[in-house]
Amino acid sequence: MPEETSSRSPPYSAAADKLRDTAKWLFTGIVATAGAILAGTSLTSMGSLDPGWRLGLASAGLALGILGLGLLAAAATRVLTVDLGTPRMIAEDAEFSATRAELDSMFRNSWPKPATNYKSLVDLVSKEFEADQQARDQAFLKIGSEMLREMTAVAGFLVVRRQFRRLLRNMWWQVLLMAVGLGLFAWAANPPAPASQRPAFSLVVR
């Protein structure tokens, strides 16, 4: 049983790191795209606008763009800085209930007896640690402790993957909001040059 879990842990740790890297590069690419949209637009051009609908539209567009970018940054940050938790937190905290359910399903045939799920394994290992040295079940304590350490990497991957999937689900409308907002800002802040008017008459001196 420990051998099975050991073979799983390193790939899960590497997969969690890859998801973090992907989230980082996705956000970096989107920020670069936003910068390209604004490359030809200066905030000083917005200040030169006369009070009216163009100024209002430029202000609203800039606010929408910043809002979309901020929401996207917050989602990406959750992937990069997600709290992976301790074994006790994973076993008891409500925020890790989905992770516990996935662990129980993935390792349903691997629990060292008498453990039957993740929470019971944490409880039993803690109980053995708190017992007197002579009363400890050293064989179970060794197997259970190793399994808990190795499952921390699996739980970490599951938590990171859940946040990454949430990032992807929400990214489309956040990017759309940012693109529409910055597009409106760039268009409204750069009004077309007024057409030159032909003189009403011309005077020709011979």
Image: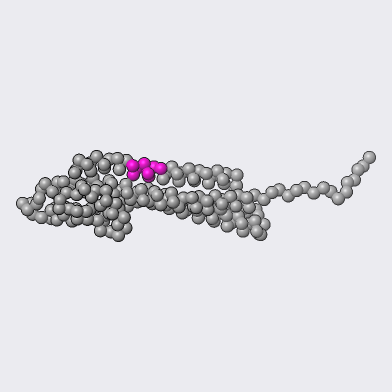
Residue at coordinates 84% horizontally, 48% vertically from top-left? 199
Vertical order, 32 against 65 (above or below)? above
Which is the main secondary structure of the residues drawn in magenta? helix
Return the x and y of residue 29 as percentages of the image width and height: 48, 43
Q: Residue furthest left?
A: 134
Image quadrant in which the N terminus is located: top left
Outermost residue on the front side: it is 109
Locate residue 84 relative to residue 203 in the image: left or right. left
Magenta range:
15-22
Picture coordinates of residue 195 (x, y %)? 75, 48
Q: Nearer the viewer, residue 82 or 105?
A: 105
Q: Quadrant of residue 11?
A: top left
Any magenta on residue 16? Answer: yes
Give the image location of residue 178, x and y in percent.
Answer: 52, 51
Residue depicted at 29% across the width and 51% down the height: 102
Q: Is residue 63 magenta?
A: no
Q: Quadrant of residue 63?
A: bottom right
The residue closer to the viewer here, 99 or 77, is: 99
Residue 128: tell me if it is visible: yes
Give the side of residue 23 with respect to residue 196, left or right: left
Q: Residue at x 22, y 55 (%)?
A: 119
